[in-house]
Image: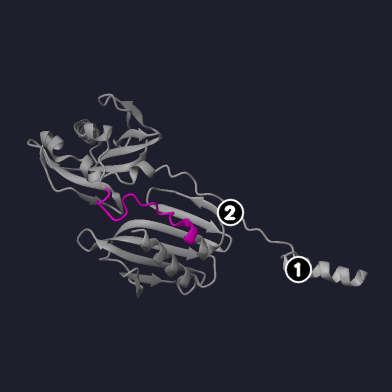
């Protein structure tokens, strides 16, 4: 009877999921706070208000600048001088050598490169910079532009429709991203447009960028979320693969793109493609 009782107990334990094998737990960490959240729906081009800038000269067409949909440039031609290009960028930090400047009651600073940055949310804000090499002139122009558009920086203009990335967090949907790389062990938001995730089984990098396709090296074509995409893997890096999705045309030969790179894992191209499909659902 003792043997039978012991057998019954062991059987019940096994059926309940209790065995001699220890239960393995996986590490999991929360996403860091999104310090850029308030900037994700700011319309950087609307900051460079044409009516406000017209007092400085003739204002050219506003357009996105560089790789981010959160930067905008405009050309201003003063009545007594050559045209100059000014840039507004949101989610910027004050330069380490910046000094306070008087800007109609705003928390404003100007650094040695002449960039004027206005803090609007903690240590982050909007920067106004001027292209060129004449620093004395640029510093004055940057202050003039910042002063002209100061009302726009007091209440930042919002426009969720300005790009497919506005209002979107590149780290999301993290619960589906981690299906490709395992439980989350580390997460970073290095910039407004990037997310870096490290899991128990690999890494996943996400970026929302504007890409000029004129000089881009195209990879293997594929369709992601009903949109044109391409996949690229270096022959000597079999544990790493990148997928880029052309979300929408934006400038001449340029597109809003989502870039997904998976590394440090097996079958990275399949995982990068799966993650790109998940990201496409959010756009």
Q: In the picture shown, does residue 230 fall above or below 165? A: below
- Residue 19 % position (x, y): 76, 66
- Residue 69 % position (x, y): 29, 51
Q: In this rendering, would 40 be left or right of 80?
A: right
Taking the spot 75% from the left edge, 66% from the top edge, the residue there is 21
Spatial CA distance of label 2 from label 1 is 28 Å
Q: Quadrant of residue 44?
A: top left
User: Which residue matches tag 1?
Assistant: 14
Element type at marker 1? helix
Range covered by the magenta-colored residues:
160-177
- Residue 247 % position (x, y): 30, 63
Which quadrant is home to the N terminus?
Answer: bottom right
- Residue 83 % position (x, y): 13, 42
Specify the label residue 52 is tagged with: none
Element type at marker 2? loop
User: Which residue matches tag 2?
Assistant: 28
Q: Earlier in the sequence, mark 2 or mark 1?
A: 1
Q: Nearer the viewer, residue 243 or 7?
A: 7
């Amino acid at each position: 009877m003792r043997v039978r009782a012991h057998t019954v107990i062991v059987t019940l334990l096994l059926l309940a999921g209790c065995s001699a094998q220890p239960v393995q737990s996986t590490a999991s960490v929360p996403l860091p706070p999104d310090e850029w959240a308030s900037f994700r729906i700011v319309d950087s081009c609307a900051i460079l208000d044409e009516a406000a800038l017209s007092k400085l000269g003739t204002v050219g067409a506003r357009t996105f600048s560089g790789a981010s949909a959160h930067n905008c440039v405009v050309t201003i031609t003063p009545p007594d001088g050559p045209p100059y290009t000014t840039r507004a960028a949101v989610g910027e930090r004050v330069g380490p050598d910046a000094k306070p400047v008087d800007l109609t009651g705003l928390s404003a600073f100007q650094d040695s490169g002449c960039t004027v940055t206005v803090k609007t949310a903690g240590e982050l804000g909007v920067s106004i910079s001027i292209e060129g090499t004449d620093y004395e002139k640029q510093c004055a122009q940057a202050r003039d532009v910042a002063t002209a558009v100061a009302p726009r920086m007091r209440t930042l203009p919002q426009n969720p429709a300005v790009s497919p990335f506005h209002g979107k967090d590149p780290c999301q949907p993290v619960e589906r991203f981690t299906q490709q790389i395992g439980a989350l062990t580390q997460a970073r938001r290095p910039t407004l447009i990037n997310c870096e995730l490290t899991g128990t089984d690999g890494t996943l990098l996400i970026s929302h960028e504007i890409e000029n396709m004129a000089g881009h090296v195209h990879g293997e074509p594929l369709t992601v979320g009903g949109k044109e995409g391409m996949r690229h893997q270096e022959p000597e890096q079999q544990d790493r693969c990148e997928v880029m999705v052309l979300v929408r045309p934006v400038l001449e030969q340029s597109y809003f793109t989502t870039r997904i790179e998976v590394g440090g894992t097996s079958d990275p191209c399949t995982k990068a493609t799966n993650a790109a499909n998940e990201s496409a659902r959010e756009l």
